[in-house]
Image: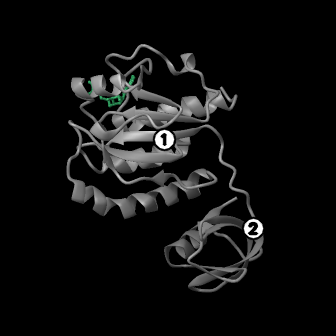
């Protein structure tokens, strides 16, 4: 079923206009059809009651439960020097089931803090676009960026994806926990000091096989493996 974002709500009627209305037209949706509408942080089953030239009205059938699959995976992603790659990171992380993304400033990554703040709104919107496409129950959360140097394990199990020093594979990890943290380096990888710091703080070094992934792919791959094994799909 197609999923659209409401522009605003009046009681039990959702109004869809602007770019979402264009999307509705592109999908060739018609009056009487059922769609999912995301409005004011809630997801609804609704039916399209009216389509005009510039907007559509949808009426609520029922509110849908937002059941998130466990475990909660938090991706700590070093911000790539090629800043636009964060957009790939967000989309892939969202599709693979990352619950929350925390952008990290790392030695070999992007350092412009003001520029990153400017991007936050756009990144949030990208999360919503991905949420519509992949039908996850909630959009990926994107937290304020932080420095890798300030990062300590916050989840029940914390990994650092380490293509140099890692030797454990994800299937050797206990995947019955509630939450996992994954740290991923930028295009040029972590510095040796960063890896040492993270390991000393308790991050378990993990090696993915058989090849080296790009930074925008590594976290999503690790998350997909965790989500699939932990939920019995793989
Ligand atoms: N240019 C670097 C590769 C960086 S890949 C090099 O030559 O080593 C970017 C990040 O993705 C890495 O820092 C690591 O966190 C993660 N990564 C990519 N492939 C990986 C693998 N096979 N195993 C573990 N981590 C990996």
User: Observer-nearest residue: 131 or 178?
Assistant: 178
Residue 156 sits above or below residue 31 on the image: above
Q: Name the residue under label 1.
A: 74
Residue 172 on image: x %, y %: 55, 16
Figure quadrant of the N terminus: bottom right
Residue 13 sits above or below residue 135 on the image: below
Residue 142 on image: x %, y %: 44, 53
User: Observer-nearest residue: 57 or 166?
Assistant: 166
Image disc number at residue 92: none
- Identified at 47% across, 43% down, the residue is 92
Q: Which of marks 1 and 2 is in front?
A: 1
User: Observer-nearest residue: 229 or 1?
Assistant: 229
Judge the density around disc 2: few (<14), some (14-19), many (≥20) Cα neighbours within 10 Å.
many
Which image quadrant for residue 42? bottom right
Are the residues at dot 1 and dot 2 in contact (C-beta closer than 8 Å)?
no
Residue 45 sits above or below residue 14 on the image: above
- Identified at 20% across, 52% down, the residue is 112
Q: In which quarter of the image is ligand 1?
A: top left
Judge the density around disc 1: few (<14), some (14-19), many (≥20) Cα neighbours within 10 Å.
many
Image disc number at residue 34: 2
Which image quadrant for residue 187? top left
Residue 85 sits above or below residue 66 on the image: above
**In-image side of 233 versus 224 (left or right):** right
**Numbered disc 2: secondary structure:** strand
Residue at the top extreme of this rendering: 167
- Identified at 37% across, 40% down, the residue is 77
Question: Mark 1 or 2 closer to N-term?
Answer: 2
């Amino acid at each position: 079923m197609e999923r659209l974002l409401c522009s605003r709500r009046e009681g039990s009627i959702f109004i869809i206009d602007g770019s979402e209305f264009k999307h509705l037209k592109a999908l060739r949706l018609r009056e009487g059809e059922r769609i999912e509408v995301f409005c004011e942080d809630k997801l609804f089953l609704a039916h399209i009651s009216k389509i005009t030239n510039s907007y559509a009205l949808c009426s609520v059938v029922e509110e849908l439960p937002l059941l998130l699959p466990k475990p909660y995976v938090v991706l700590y992603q070093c911000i790539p020097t090629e800043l636009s790659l964060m957009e790939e990171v967000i989309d892939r992380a969202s599709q693979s089931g990352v619950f929350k993304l925390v952008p990290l400033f790392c030695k070999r990554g992007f350092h412009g803090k003001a520029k990153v703040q400017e991007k936050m709104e756009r990144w949030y919107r990208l999360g919503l676009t991905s949420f519509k496409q992949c039908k996850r129950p909630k959009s990926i959360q994107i937290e304020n960026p932080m420095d890798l140097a300030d990062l300590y394990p916050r989840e029940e199990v914390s990994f650092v994806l380490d293509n140099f020093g890692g030797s454990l594979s994800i299937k050797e990890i206990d995947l019955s926990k509630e939450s996992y943290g994954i740290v991923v380096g930028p295009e040029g990888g972590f510095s040796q000091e960063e890896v040492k710091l993270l390991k000393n703080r308790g991050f378990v070094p993990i090696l993915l096989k058989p090849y080296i992934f790009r930074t925008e792919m590594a976290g999503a791959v690790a998350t997909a493996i965790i989500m699939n094994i932990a939920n019995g799909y793989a």
